[in-house]
Image (cartoon, rainbow, N blue to C red):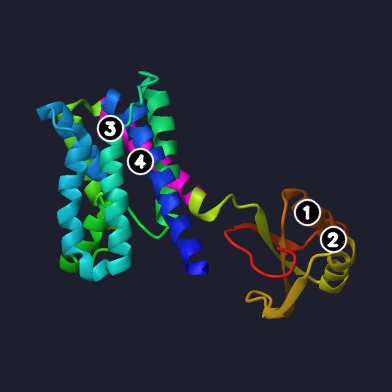
Amino acid sequence: MKYLERFFEEYIMIIIGVIVMAASMDMFLIPNKIAPGGVSGLATILYYLFSLNVGLVIAILNVPLFILAFRKLGFLFCIKSLFATALFSLAVDILPIPCITHDLLLASIFGGVLMGAGLGLVIKAGATTGGSDTAAVLAARVFKHIKINWLIFIIDFVVILIAAFVFSPELSLYGLAAIFISSKAAELVLEGPSTSRMIIIISKNSEAISSKILVELNRGVTSFSGTGMYSKQGVNVLLCVVHRDAEVQFVKDIVMNEDNSAFLIVGNVKEVLGEGF
């Protein structure tokens, strides 16, 4: 039963993600000649050069990539990705979604946000719509010394370069902006907003600081033994994870009241698992 629930959940997520991506293409990117890199960007360029349907070109370019990458990506992943790609191709060509702005800045921003949000949902469901990612996986077999993220960048950059010649350098820059915004939106969907903070404290009054954090803030603290490499003296290093920026300020106040010469580091945390989080 759980498998069926997960199955339907994944495919519903793919459908929603694909529709959002198609809306991005039809409402913002295609009408404004913004090529968002990869296969979608190349399909947009071919649409204006030869009047070819964008969705059809996306399907034609992606299917061979999936066939070649079948062993590398796995059966279930390829099946879900083929479904997502086929649905994306149909949605771009069939859905009656009108263009709502010809302002290039708005089109690149909102087109990138929707594209990234939709792609994030598809990836979260364990699939992809092909394009740069799949092409990069295949290229990595030949160029083994180059990392996949760099191969994705190279593929997208080549498409942007083609758009600069076919459309204009200005439009290609809007396409580059859309790619950047899309990647950040996809990251936000996949990982969620980073609200937790990690705090590292080095202080001679570590006992007093940790006691106040435990009692007044009700957050756990872990102590490590360290050595100052300049002084060669032993120090206690405190590690604490808090949930909100207000709690960060609370910890800062505690540290400054107990030891205004303490060394304190605050960093974002992508994910926290355990009691209280």
In the rendered view, tell whether residue 141 sits above or below residue 65. Answer: below
What residue is disc 1 on? 247
Which comes before the other along the chain, label 1 or label 2?
2
Image depth: mark 3 or mark 4 in front:
3
Callout 1 touching callout 2 (CB < 8 Å)? yes
Q: Quadrant of the C terminus?
A: bottom right
Q: Amino acid at mark 2?
A: Leu
Which residue is at 17% across, 40% downward? 57
Q: Amino acid at mark 3?
A: Ile
Q: How many marks?
A: 4
Which comes before the other along the chain, label 3 or label 4?
3
Which residue is at 33% across, 54% downward? 128
As measured in the structure, the alpha-carbon distance from the residue carrying label 2 to the one carrying label 4 is 41 Å
Which comes before the other along the chain, label 2 or label 4?
4
As measured in the structure, the alpha-carbon distance from the residue carrying label 1 to the one carrying label 4 is 35 Å
Which comes before the other along the chain, label 3 or label 2?
3
Instruction: Give coordinates of residue 2: x percent, y percent.
Output: 52, 68
Badge 2 marks a residue whose secondary structure is: helix
The magenta stretch spans residue 187: yes
Q: Which mark is residue 217?
A: 2
As measured in the structure, the alpha-carbon distance from the residue carrying label 3 to the one carrying label 1 is 50 Å
Q: What span is colored magenta in the figure?
A: 170-188
- The secondary structure that dominates the magenta segment is helix
What residue is disc 4 on? 179
